[in-house]
Image: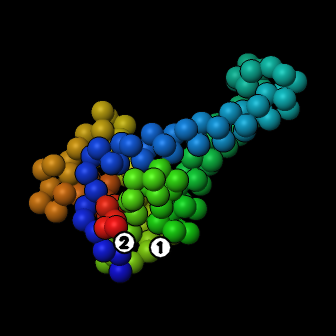
């Protein structure tokens, strides 16, 4: 079981910003490869045809895969490690694949509309964001 208390909005945003730096680098590398394979032309529907959709799926796969692999392996992304956060199941144990996948899906929806689903943690009695509650997971601030 992981000890700690529910992570606040500021730490979650800080971890997301750290993760966005690493993800940007990964996406640039992937996009560079796609542009090279597309004869050094931007990957757009008019230049790549149906491959454009595969490229887009690859971008999504990299982002979702980054979170899933890290949450399943240690419960922490690079940004979460820096800010002493860990994503766990509601029992406090490591997440299963289903919970991590639901967290990823609901997390995208929670952050998208001006982070309203994440700000929900200020209204929630247990200080859980909307995607925490829907995926039956938690982000805890680890005690050091």
Which residue occupies 79% across, 28% down?
A: 35
Q: Is residue 89 visible?
A: yes
**Which badge, 2 or 1, comes first in the chain's sequence?**
2
Instruction: Give the quadrant of residue 54.
Output: top right
Label 1, secondary structure: give it. loop
Residue at 28% across, 56% down: 7
Q: Which residue is mark 1?
A: 96
How crowded pointer 2 is (Cα within 10 Å; few <14, some 14-19, many 20+) is rated as many
In this picture, residue 136 sits left or right of residue 24 = left
Q: Quadrant of the C terminus?
A: bottom left
SS at mark 2?
strand
Residue on which the image places disc 2: 89
Q: Is residue 11 above or below residue 47?
A: below
Residue at x-position 80% and y-position 19%: 41
Compared with 95, 130 (above or below) is above
Left or right: where does residue 124 sit relative to residue 107?
left
Asked if the residue under mark 1 is in contact with the one under mark 2, i.e. CB atoms within 8 Å, the reply is: yes
Q: CA distance from mark 2 to mark 1?
A: 8 Å
Residue 117 location (% of width, % of height): 27, 45
Q: Position of residue 66 (x, y in %)?
A: 58, 53
Q: Residue at x 48, y 61 (%)?
A: 76
Among the 4 quarters of the image, the one containing residue 86 = bottom left
Residue 108 screen position, x and y as percent: 41, 45
Is 71 located above or below residue 118 in the figure?
below
Query: Dot 1, crowdedness within 10 Å: few (<14), some or many (≥20)?
Result: some
Residue 115 is situated, as x and y percent measured from the top left of the image, at: 30, 38
């Amino acid at each position: 079981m992981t000890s700690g208390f529910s992570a606040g909005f500021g730490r979650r945003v800080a971890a997301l910003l750290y993760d966005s730096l690493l993800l940007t680098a990964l996406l640039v590398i992937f996009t560079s490869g796609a542009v090279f394979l597309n004869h050094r032309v931007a990957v757009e529907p008019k230049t790549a045809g149906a491959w454009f959709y595969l490229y887009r799926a690859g971008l999504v796969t990299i982002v979702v895969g980054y979170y899933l692999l890290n949450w399943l392996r240690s419960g922490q992304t690079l940004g979460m490690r820096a800010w002493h956060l860990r994503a766990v199941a509601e029992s406090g144990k490591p997440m299963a694949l289903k919970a991590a996948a639901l967290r990823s899906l609901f997390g995208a929806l929670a952050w998208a509309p001006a982070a309203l689903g994440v700000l929900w943690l200020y209204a929630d009695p247990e200080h859980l964001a909307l995607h925490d509650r829907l995926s039956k997971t938690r982000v805890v601030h680890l005690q050091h």
